[in-house]
Amino acid sequence: MSDALTAAEKPQTTNFIKEIINEHNRTGKYEGRVHTRFPPEPNGYLHIGHAKSICLNFGIAQEYGGKTNLRFDDTNPCKEDTEYVDSIIEDVRWLGFDWEDRMYYASDYFGQLYEYAIQLIKAGKAYVDSQTADEIRQTRGTLTEPGKESPYRDRPVEESLDLFEKMKKGEFPDGSMVLRAKIDMASPNMNMRDPVMYRILHAEHHRTGNEWCIYPMYDWAHGICDSIERITHSICTLEFEIHRPLYDWFLEELGVYRPQQIEFARLNMTYTLMSKRKLLQLVKENHVSGWDDPRMPTISGLRRRGYTPESIRTFAEKIGVAKADSVVDISLLEHCIRDDMNKRAPRVMAVLRPLKMVIENYPEGQVEMMEAQNNPEDPDAGNRVVPFSREVYIERDDFMENPPKKYFRLSPGAEVRLKHAYYVTCTDVIKDENGEIVEIRCKYDPESRGGGTPDGRRVLGTLHWVSVPHAVDAEIRLYEHLFSKPNPEEDPDFRVNINPDSVEVLKGCKVEPGLKTVKTGDFFQFLRQGYFCVDRVDSSEDHIVLNRTTGLKDSWAKIAKKDK
């Protein structure tokens, strides 16, 4: 078992980010304010790693009575789309967080960013470079060798100002020149070697249209946007730690308000990809049905599969906040949804692979309404009634003609209990011309209703069932991990680790008649089967589709208990 799971099991009393904020509040650095932001790029759907960041940014602000902005980092029009903007808004709201009236875009500040760039050019801190992207890359140096200064580095200020204005007016083609900060080409930090601030992109922006043809780079725009919005704590993932000196350099050179950038370890999880680029590849190459495919680690995929916002927030709390990278076992996420659904999901009976049982001594045409408990974990859930008749469906796997020892389900001559109903004993097996079992015959004990008999005998096997004349048809989709290896990226091409058995579609399943009126998003525990959710996309009044969210077996809890 990994250390990450052991640590996640322990209560999170504090974390290093709170310690930094507490010190800032003690010294009055930000006048006691806590103002965070969640800054997604609208170039894909959010995934479970983003959910951790959302919960952290909004949760920290809530804990300190502060505020959180939702700000879209829309600085690359070639990869962005309003579809992604809409999905992000839906995901953050679904997780239970509210930015009130503080939704912004980096494009809101394009004018101010341009003016600040001019300020740096005038101060001799930025210049227009006419080298190609390849030439800039070749002169950047390595981790052990300094870079080479651009031949345009000492370009006169007035010339750079003139060229920068012409860049803005669209007088140059893409890639012909860039604006770079003038810092230190010998810096041991590669990000400080005259980084690019603006590039030319003649591309239509989803908000500003064709107003701009130069677009700011992330490192330039990010800190300025934080400053304009007077963010106090700019919380980002660990890969931006090496970018922090540049973040601070821009703000210091401009002489503007300076937030504190704080880095934390991003979420890494077994059997999962956390790269939007690779997730997009899965979508485009049709390895999945879309961004919201229930096998995807996207928030929309998890929502469609049946995960609740409460379970994801609990997961984010359990994994905590760390400074060092680690890998969390996906079974912890499954434990969180299982624990949440166990308390809230109504119990129902569903037969996934039906086998017909005829109870020969049960009166033909008779129907009894059997009382069944909705959820033993919820004292207020009450009971329901389930129709019982002479013919019922049971699971095909619950019958074996020649069973091994210690087989406690149904077999010829064996007696089992039908949940909420009677004891039955198998008397005969009906097969088709191919020798396949198509029906079993049984007799029931009329005195065993409710699970007991006058003679006090007990049976070891209890089966779920659905009455044949009352059954509702359903399509059920059984999902497994999308990847067959805990680390799908350990091979050069992660696609070789796609699990060919990641989904099994079962048609002709039979469920209780009460499920005839289900709504999309409703979730249930199917007795002995797992937790299921009504599909939000493919389910309709005439065609019920249910996704298995997770199974009943809580492997994480068993491992965690053993590890104590």
Image: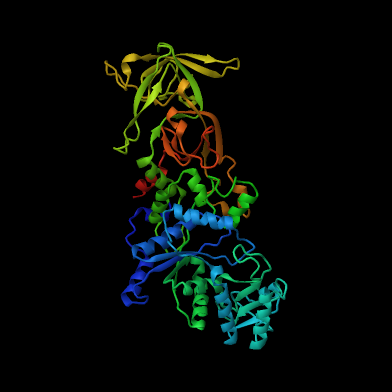
**Residue at left 65%, top 88%?**
158
Does 519 sit left or right of 160 as displayed?
A: left
What colouring method underlies this structural image? rainbow
Does 51 sit left or right of 482 as displayed?
A: left
**Residue at left 38%, top 52%?**
314
Decide if residue 66 is in sight here: yes
Residue 191 versus residue 279: which sits nearer the camera? Answer: 279
**Residue at left 60%, top 17%?**
434
Residue 13 lies in quadrant: bottom left
Residue 295 versus residue 554: which sits nearer the camera? Answer: 295
Residue 525 placement (x, y as % from top left): 41, 36
**Residue at left 48%, top 54%?**
91
Residue 512 placement (x, y as % from top left): 44, 28
Residue 131 placement (x, y as % from top left): 70, 77
Q: How many marks?
A: 0
Residue 500 versus residue 71: which sits nearer the camera? Answer: 71
Please tell me whether residue 388 is drawn above or below residue 222 in the rendered image: above
Decide if residue 321 is in sight here: no
Residue 116 lies in quadrant: bottom right
Residue 515 placement (x, y as % from top left): 45, 32
